[in-house]
Structure formats: structure tokens, C-alpha cells
Amino acid sequence: MAVTTVLHQASYSWQRTRSGTAFGPVRSTLAAPELQRVHRRIEHWLRTSPSGSPGLSHFYGNFDRDAVFVRRVQPRGGRSAISHLLVGPSALLTPRLALELRDWQWLPTQGEHLAPLEIRALDQYRVSLDAEAHSPEALARLTPLLSHVLATGEGVVELPPSDYAYSLLWGLQAILDGLAFDLSRRTRWKLTFETYDDRPALPSGSGVFVRFRTGAKEPASHPVYASVADQLVATYTHRSAAVRAGADPDPHPSGAHMPSPVPVRPSPASVTSKLITCPICASTVDWADPALYRYDPLMGSYAELTIPATASDTQRAQMMRTAFVRCVDPEEPGSAHYLPLAYGQYGAPAVYGFIGATKSGKTHLLTAMIGQMEKHGLGFGLRHRPLTLAGHKSLIDEQVSPFLNKSQVIEQTRLGTVGLVDVLLIRDGEGEARPIALFDVAGGDLLEIEAARKFLDVVDGLIFVVNAAELGQDELGDRTFNTVLELLEGSGRLAEVSAAVVLCKADLLRFDDPVTLWMRQEDRVLDAQASLNESADVYAYLRARDADAWTRPYREGRKATLHVASATGSDIVVDKTFVRGVRPCRVLNPLISLMAMTGVLTSPEARKIGI
Amino acid sequence: MTTQPGQRLVFLDVRGVQEEATVTAVGEDPLPVGSHLRSRSLTLEYVDGTPNEVLHLSPELGRSAGYDALDNEILAGLRLSRLCGSYPYPSCVSRLLGYEAHGEHPFALLAPYRGEPVGSTGGRILPTEKSAFQRSLLAGVRWVSAAGIAHRALSPFNVHWDGMSAQITGFSDATIAGAPRAVVGVPPWQAPEQRPGQVNGAVTDKDDVWAAGRLIYYVSTGRDLVRGDQVCDEPDLAHLLGGIFGPIGERPSVRELLDRLNLADPVPRLAVPDTDLRQWRAEFLRLRACKHPHTVDRDKPSAPSGTTPKPSEPPRRRRRLWR
Ligand SMILES: [Zn+2]
């Protein structure tokens, strides 16, 4: 059976008919019989009562395998009512997607006609409610609601209309989708909802139906289910720190995120646990008050770090700054690895991996990126600051500075297959700060499949580095790319990981069309049209030069961009020194694009990048 | 690095073929071609024994600006040669013969310039030569724009005159059309959009027209142009230079200026678009349209409407009901 990725739409309004007026479909992408079938099912929910609220409200319901999402307004009384419908398989049109699209006014047209919507086309309109759902006000209301949902099972739970309706529904769908499991039915509950209604009547339906209705009473917690609900809400609060907001709207579908039962009922004040997914082994590490370790350079090993009770605040802060958290891969219980404490202190970072063969210029690109960021900033209102201060300082001292200031060739330091290079906190204007973590992934013969697989389960974005000097003849590089893409495909994450393909050492091609033009454009810009043009040009150039493997990330990934860049500006090395000096060219755009594609940057322009 | 007799030079010609030649004589620095490049005249002996007089350009030592200036010379030379293809190379622009761009000591080899800069005593133009100067200068500017580049620093010091025709030289500030504009050139030959505080947008094929017009005025009248409307006082020039010194939006293209002189386009219509790249760009856009259908341009014919799925399954039995 072909899997459809298309949603249908329909629009309703009042129209004159021979027998008077009727509220009926004006336009639809559904065939007439289908539309009739849908219409019969959702007729009741097409609008609120004629005297009802003029404001915006939504209905979301499940019928057989289809879901229907209705957006309703009646700005000037009942006769001005307009409704828009999205219809699609429930697996596509999930409650979460519906909530994300709450502000979108659909009906884009192709010419005069209403067009079916490719699900991916909606990506740029999806707006998470994660932050709102985690406000103390919303969380306080979520527990009683959840307790009633758990008590009722499949059925109707009513609340009075609320400013927190969408936030509550968001939290509820997250819990029903991820944490709560209907043991008796061995299935997850399906949430359906109506964000506002003023009519007591209600047709029958299936699933959990949450409805905000005038006249309903504010529920107190259900006596039996209050404590379970409380635990689930608490777990939801912790876990949210581990779910990267915005970047991958659908949590990775597997039982892996199911938390173990919370043993005691936590009081709200003690809810401080922060679960972070380890990028090395993909297991979950609690970052709230973890055991600390320090690296002993003399011993070349890690030792437990005990901060004496007598330590001053300054001393404590200093020790924390260089502290590590230990993680043990459950699949290899004997071995441990360590992440800087700062890695998880600001929530789960957006995880970026640099992929490329050993000689691709990857290390120099990474070094140049960090150097340019340090020197010039990221531009257009973006601020950044390093989180792993000690690590960042040694990176600057040992790599960036010799590279940029003394033009020295940087030898790759191997930290295992997947090495953490830097963690930075990025703030977009006055928006919420998001950490990003940069990882160097060993390529070529050094790529270890098992370690790479685990990392790729956690990664949000990849920077594929290709060497302009080996255009179309880089077997090792091709193999690295193909392996990574196949691993992603195998785990079903190919579509959700964003990619920036960087044609590095592009200085070697700087007299070639269209490389010349892009090498002479500015770095540190966020311009969707320019990014699209550059991507198309670089794609065409690579294809024309038979570098097909290098264009795979664009062909197969969902969001992807292509770039030209040069970490050094020239490639001639004498005595381990770039004799013509090091002049990075357009090294930050790939990183900025990746931040845009993975939701770290959230401006309207950023959302168009990679699409 | 000093270039001296006996030295062997390895470089690429404009088609990318590797060449070798031995330096048999080194001449005086003929002219300063720009602030960041050194130039020498060399006599080269190729492997097959043919001697050749060339101009050798290399970056001033230790200056990154020198590398950029050399790159610009090479870029301009390569693009002009590629545009020209198998047609005779136009005499109205300097000619790149070979280059070594990536090594420790990069250089470019050019055919020796013709004549002398029009700003020098030797390059002075007689009243009877004015119109030949105008024609050949504009032909040169047209070749430059057709090659997709802008010279950006036309001045009496790099436009040469040999008594017969002009030659544009000194491409060390050239760049590709579409690159961001920058402060380039020197007053009074600097177009307004290249002056400090007025720079914005991307380089276009009209950027050189301002300086070319200014140069024509200067050579024809012997005076500096202080105000744009001075042109109106010169009946001979008012028509040719009309609109050049006003707002850039109304600035004529060099094709238009050639039209005003009743001259045909000197660039033959042989520009072969890079069909290879075009084909792959089209593939990119097809892929994009599949991945993100909403990006398909609304004006273009949309994808066949057969994408509407038919209901594929009979409705399943209803599950438990609320009431
Ligand atoms: Zn781990």
C-alpha cells in the first residue's frame, strides 16, 4: 500500500442555495463522496453556536483512520462563520501537528485551485507549544486534567474555557503519546479535542475527548489518579529538558524514551531532574545533581570530584567549570565516558556532527568556524558564549590561535569516533538561549559503525565536509557519506536530521563558475533566497563533476543546504604552515544554516532555510 | 621571490593545460599596475624553443591584498578568454596568457600591454583620435561586462592608448557581477556606489559605465567633470554621455552607449550557456518540488493533479463509543 503524505483541505462558509442559505463547503481538495463522508461525521463541530464566541477555536477528531482538524471563526456573528478543514490519515495529522498548526490559516492555492498539501510543506508553519506548556500555570492545571483523563479512559473530559487550553492540550498529548500507556488495551490513548464550545450537546465519538466548554466546572484532581497524574506530569517536566525543542517535532518513536516508573511521588519543589541524551552512547543521563569527575592530566584519567563543604562560592564555581559527568554505556558496562558538566546544564543541546574523510579539511573547517565566531561573532543579532569554558579555552589556545594567528596546520586530535569539540549557548535576539554541541565524527577508515550509529540516534544536524581537491574521486569520503546516510536510513531518521553539505577547500575552485560567485559573497548571513541559490548552484556543480555521493544528503534528507567554503583560503603548506596565511572564507554560513534548519534560530527567514 | 634569468616557471594556460618556460631575460618594472601587485617584463623561452615577451604579475610580499589582486587579474583574464573561445582575442582588453594561482609564489603572465596610459604624456590623445578612443574603450567595457565581471577601477592610469585604440588593463580590483559592492577605485574616477558610505547592493554590469563616461569626458575635453550636468554644455558629448552621471537606476548600459555611437555589439553571440550546470540545477529544483511542493512557483504549471489520493481502504469498524 502506498503511504500517502498528503493532507486534504476544505473551506466552509454560509452560501445561498435554492432553498435558502446553508453552511456548506465552498472549496475542497476531496472528491465529492469523500467530502460528504467527512461532512456527515464532523457536521456538529464545523462551528460553535451562532450566538457563540467570535474568536478562533479548533476541533480535532479521529474517524476511522482519518483525522479532521477544524479551524473556526465567526468574526461578526453566526452568519460570518468560516471554517477550514484539514483531513488526513491520523498517523499524519496527529494531535500534535494539529496544535502546532493552530495559528496557520491554511488554503494556499495553486492558481485558482485549492491544492492538497504535502505534509512536509507544513513544516515551516509548525510552532511548538513546549514553552507555554511548561509554564507553572499550565503545569498546575495539567495534573487535575490528566487525572480525569486517566480515570475516564476513552471518553469525554470537560473543562471551562481557558487561556491555557492549547498549552494544556499540548502537555496532555505529549504525555498520552509518550508516557502513558493504556495497559488494558495495550495501546496509547488517542487525544481528540475542542478548544472552545458553548453547546452542551455532543455526538458520540471515540478516543479521549477533551473539551473546553462554557458552563463546565474546573476539575479538582481525581482522588484515585491524582498521584499517577502528578508523577507523569513531573516526568514530562524533566523529560522536556531532554527533548530538543522545535528541531524534531516528532519525538523519536520508540520505547527508549519511556521513563522508568517514578518510585515516590515527587513534590513539585524537588522537580529538578534534567534528562539528557548522551551523544556517545544514546543512553539517558540525569543531569540534576550528578556525580562529578575531574580530569587529571598527569594521570591521564578521570577521578571523582568532591567539592569540599568548606569551598567558597568562587571555588565551587571554578571546580564546576572544569567538572565532568560520567556516563556508562549499558551495552558496554565496563567502559565509561565523560561529558563536560556544562554540556547538559542549559537543557539538551542541539547536537551537530561533522562528517568527512580524514583529509577532507574537516578539522580546519571546525577550527576556522570557532575562530571566526570568536573573532567576528555570528552576526545579525545572534550572540554566543562558550559553555565548556576550560575546553573552549584550550581549544582556542591549542588549535584556533595557532591556526588563525600563526597559520599552523592543525593535527587532528582523536577523541574516539565521536569527539566533542565545543558547546556554545546561542541566543537569537531576545529569544530563548539554546545550547549547541559540535562533534567531530571520525571519517574514512576510522569510522566505527557502532559508535556512529549511537551518535546518529541523537544528532540533530550534520555538516558533511567534502574536499574540493578530490572532487568526484574521493572513495573514502564517499564511503563515509554513504555509511552515515545508510545508518540514518536504517534508524528511520534520515528525514528528520538536517544537513549542510560544505564544499571545503573551495579556494581550489575559485575561478570556476559558479564557485567564484559564492566565494565572493558575504559570510554570516541568513538569507533564504541566497541560500537556495547557492545550494542549487553547488548541487549542480557537484553533479556536473560526478561527485554524486556528495549530493545524497540533499536528495535524501528533508532539510538540507549546500555551501562553498574555505577554512584557510589557500592550500599550500610548507613546514606545517600555510605559507600564504590563513584566511577563512564563508565558514560560518553552514553552521548558521544548520542552526536555522534545526530550530535553534526561529525567525521567519530561518524557517525557510533548507526548504 | 625575485624572478631571474634561468628560472623555470610552471603554470597553466587559460585552458588549464600545464606549460613550462624558462626565464631568459628580466626587464625593468614597466609600470606600477596597482598598489598590491608587482609587475616585470620577462622574456620566456618555452619548451619548444619559442621566445615570448610577457608581463609577469605577482603579489607584493606578505600582503594578503596582493593575493586578492592577483586573483582578480586571473579571474578577469580567464573569464574573458572563456567568453572569447576560439574567436580572435579582443585587443581592447588585456590578455592573460598563463597563471599559477595556488602555490607559495603565485603569478600571472599577461601579453604586454599596448601603448601607454592615457593619463601619461605618452598616452595623450589627439583631438582627431577622440572618437576612436570612445569606440574602443566602450568595446572593451562591453567585453568586460559580457564576461560577467566589472573592472571597478577604470582610470587614466590603466586605460592605455597606442594611437589606434584603447586597451583596458589592470584588473586587480575586478570582481564578478553579483558580488557585494565594496569601496573600490580612487576619486575622481570612483563611481558613487563605490564611495565610502554609499556602498550597497551587488555589482552590476553598469558599475563600470560611470567611470567609462567620466574618462570619455576627461579625454575629450581635457577637463575634470565636477557636476553631472556639465555634460550638457558639450554638444558632442551630451548625447553619448546622457544619463550616465545621474541615479544608477537610470544609468545606460554599455550596449546602449554603443548604440548611441551606432556601433554593433563587438561580442559575438557565441556565449554557450553551461548546459551541464543548467541540467543539474533543474534536477535540484525538481527534487525540491518533490520534497517541498509548496515551494513550486505558482506561476509555473503545477504538478499533474493526479496526486490526490483515493481512499485506499474501506472504513474500519468503529471502536468503543463515548455514549
Ligand atoms: Zn553515554
Image (cartoon, grey):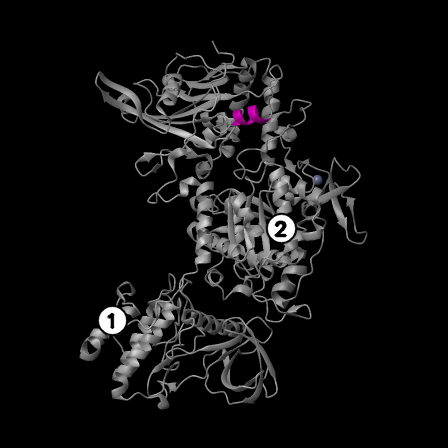
Q: Position of residue A12 (x, y in %)?
A: 32, 25
The residue sitting at 34% across, 82% down in the picture is B166
> Is there CB contact under 8 Å for labels 2 and 1?
no
Relative to A246, residue B12 above or below? below
- Foreground of the two, A295 or A126: A126
Residue B255 in the image: above or below residue A58:
below
| Amino acid type of the residue tagged 1 in the rendering | Asp
Q: Chain of mark 2?
A: A
Main SS of residues in magenta = helix
For label 1, the residue is B259
Viewer-proximal residue, A47 or B147?
B147
The one of A356 and A546 positioned closer to us in this rendering: A546
Indicate which disc residue A355 carries: 2
Q: Position of residue B123 (x, y in %)?
A: 35, 88
Q: Is residue B131 left or right of residue B41?
A: left
Which quarter of the picture shows residue A18?
top left
